[in-house]
Image: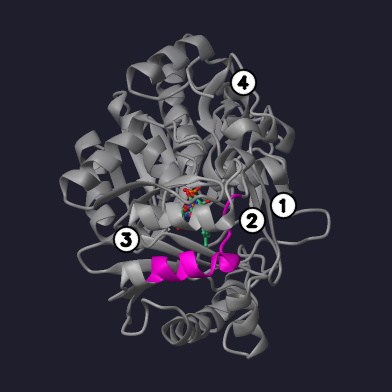
């Protein structure tokens, strides 16, 4: 604290410019709050701009369960020519495919239009706490150290940095100290979609399909593969245990992996994004361990491209088209909130009166090597995320949203995907505004949840009326 030179004041300070943080900041700013979004890196948008699809925006039945800020960003992305849209993977989910390059522009436009103040290259390194309240966040950047003060703070840092430094109770990993793997996304251009899909129809034994009873119904893998073919999109999940991946691992051509996830990102460029590299059990809050993983992941990416060119029809003439701007981190710390979302809530599609957003993604926990837990939500439906899971226990004016949410490991395994993370962020941003305007300014624990739900619905959030 010794060298704090500058002091600034905002209504709401959001730490972390990933999908949860941008949703929170846009929501707070649109509600009239002077909002600061802090991002340590050089880009905002998080995994929206790495080549991943948005999961959990629709349930397995194909009903949209997340609207609001996410929809606004998708509409901007479509306006700029980037929309691919919702695709059924005939496995467990419907996901929304996007062009990460165009998404960079869409995110920037929506954030700017909302009037969010953005500080990139700015790391929130410390927190000032008095009593049960956070009174400031210390930010370091090339300008020096700034003490930023606000009545409400939103921790969307993925790692719960603000909550941890404020002394909140934290959870990390599981009892064995395992972490879901790191993954470096990469993109491949020049892919012949119909050749790839024909290979799927001819060899459905390689595909992860029909895993949700709801989605698979009584279809055979071959019929699911035919449905994939009929969508005419290069949206394919090859699974571990199938001959394609097993052969690749046995011949030493491929790292041990649970999947080769192929995700359409641009029909124009015949480009897909690939989710296959992995190193498990790295604590990504250790910057040295994270950095040491980098070259192993880039090496895996290069070898995976060679493997795909040599083994998967449609990729014969494909070329390397780009690498994610950062290592993908699935899990680190989680904040203990007034409520902890559980795997039971998720799997039973539990509905609640105090729901501020919905999740619908299966419990999805990647493990070491070829292992991955995938358990579908009951009946292809969705669950409600309660308001109380957003508020950090014991701290008057702090929300925690996104990857560092208050959830047990199974609950997190579902709600960690982008749809629910953005719904959480949107609710916290608006909740911050309601709290500041209430007769207990800044006390986020006493927000009128009925009022918040009504306001969220007005801005397009989906809270009711779906399975
Ligand atoms: C490989 C991989 C595959 C996935 N697949 C999918 C998928 O297909 N579909 C899907 O919907 N989801 C998927 N997910 C999950 C999902 O993408 C993430 O859980 C989600 O994007 C998390 O968003 P977030 O905003 O909470 O966190 P993050 O995206 O991690 O954002 C946190 C931001 O905070 C910044 N930050 C951290 N600490 C500080 C600090 N102290 N000061 C300032 N800034 C800070 C970071 O730089 C970062 O930009 C996947 C995740 C990974 C890693």
Return the disc, 3 or 2, that comes first in the chain's sequence. Answer: 3
SS category of the residue bearing label 3: strand
Q: For the residues carrying marks 3 and 2, which lies nearer the camera in this image?
A: 3
Q: For the residues carrying marks 1 and 3, which lies nearer the camera in this image?
A: 3
Of 169 and 109, the residue lying toward us:
109
Image quadrant assignment for residue 445: top right
Query: Where is residue 395 shown, x and y percent of the image?
Result: 63, 30
Is residue 79 something that shows in the picture? Answer: yes
Return the disc, 1 or 3, that comes first in the chain's sequence. Answer: 1
The residue that mark 1 highlights is: 172
Q: Are marks 4 and 3 in contact (CB under 8 Å)?
A: no
Q: What span is in magenta?
A: 196-210
Q: For the residues carrying marks 4 and 1, which lies nearer the camera in this image?
A: 4
Of 442 and 256, the residue lying toward us:
256
The residue that mark 4 highlights is: 351
Q: Main secondary structure of the magenta part?
A: helix
Q: Are marks 2 and 1 in contact (CB under 8 Å)?
A: yes
Q: From the viewer's perspective, tell me whether residue 149 is left or right of residue 160.
A: left
The residue that mark 3 highlights is: 265
Image quadrant assignment for residue 310: bottom left
**Mark 4 and mark 1: span between their CA atoms?**
27 Å
The residue that mark 2 highlights is: 332
Return the disc, 2 or 1, that comes first in the chain's sequence. Answer: 1
Label 4, ligand 1: CB separation under 8 Å: no
**Extreme-right residue of the structure:** 175
């Amino acid at each position: 604290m010794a060298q704090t030179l500058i002091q600034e004041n905002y209504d709401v300070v959001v730490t972390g410019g990933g999908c949860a943080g941008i949703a929170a900041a846009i929501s707070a700013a649109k509600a009239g709050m002077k909002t600061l979004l802090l991002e340590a890196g050089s880009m905002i948008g998080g995994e929206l701009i790495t080549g991943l699809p948005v999961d959990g925006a629709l349930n397995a039945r194909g009903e949209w369960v997340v609207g609001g800020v996410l929809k606004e960003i998708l509409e901007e992305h479509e306006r700029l020519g980037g929309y691919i849209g919702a695709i059924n993977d005939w496995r467990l989910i419907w996901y929304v495919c996007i062009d990460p390059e165009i998404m960079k522009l869409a995110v920037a436009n929506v954030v700017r239009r909302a009037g969010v103040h953005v500080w990139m290259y700015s790391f929130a390194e410390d927190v000032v706490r008095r009593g049960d309240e956070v009174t400031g966040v210390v930010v370091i950047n090339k300008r020096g150290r700034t003490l930023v003060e606000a009545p409400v703070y939103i921790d969307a840092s993925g790692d719960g940095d603000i909550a941890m430094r404020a002394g909140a109770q934290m959870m990390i990993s599981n009892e064995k100290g395992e972490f879901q793997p790191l993954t470096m996304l990469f993109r491949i251009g020049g892919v012949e979609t119909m050749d790839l899909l024909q290979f799927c129809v001819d060899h459905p034994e390689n595909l992860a399909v029909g895993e949700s009873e709801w989605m698979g119904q009584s279809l055979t893998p071959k019929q699911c593969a035919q449905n994939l073919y009929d969508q005419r999109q290069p949206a394919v999940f090859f699974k571990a245990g199938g001959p394609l991946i097993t052969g690749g691992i046995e011949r030493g051509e491929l790292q041990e992996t649970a999947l080769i996830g192929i995700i359409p990102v641009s029909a124009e460029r015949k480009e897909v994004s690939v989710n296959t590299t992995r190193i498990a059990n790295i604590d990504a809050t250790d910057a040295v361990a994270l950095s040491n993983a980098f070259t192993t992941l880039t090496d895996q990416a290069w070898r995976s491209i060679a493997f795909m060119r040599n083994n998967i029809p449609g990729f014969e003439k494909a070329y390397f088209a780009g690498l994610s701007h950062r290592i993908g981190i699935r899990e680190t710390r989680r904040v203990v909130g007034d409520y902890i979302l559980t795997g039971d809530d998720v799997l039973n599609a539990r509905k609640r009166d105090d729901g501020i957003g919905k999740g619908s993604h299966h419990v999805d926990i990647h493990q070491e090597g070829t292992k991955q837990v995938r358990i579908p939500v009951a009946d292809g439906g969705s669950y409600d995320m309660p308001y109380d899971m957003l508020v950090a226990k014991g701290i008057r004016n702090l929300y925690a949203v996104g990857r560092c949410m208050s959830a047990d490991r199974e609950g997190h395994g579902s709600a960690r995907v982008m749809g629910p993370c953005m719904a959480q962020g949107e609710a916290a941003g608006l909740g911050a505004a309601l709290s500041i305007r209430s007769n207990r300014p800044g006390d986020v624990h006493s927000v009128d949840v009925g009022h918040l739900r009504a306001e969220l619905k007005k801005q397009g959030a989906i809270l009711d009326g779906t399975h």
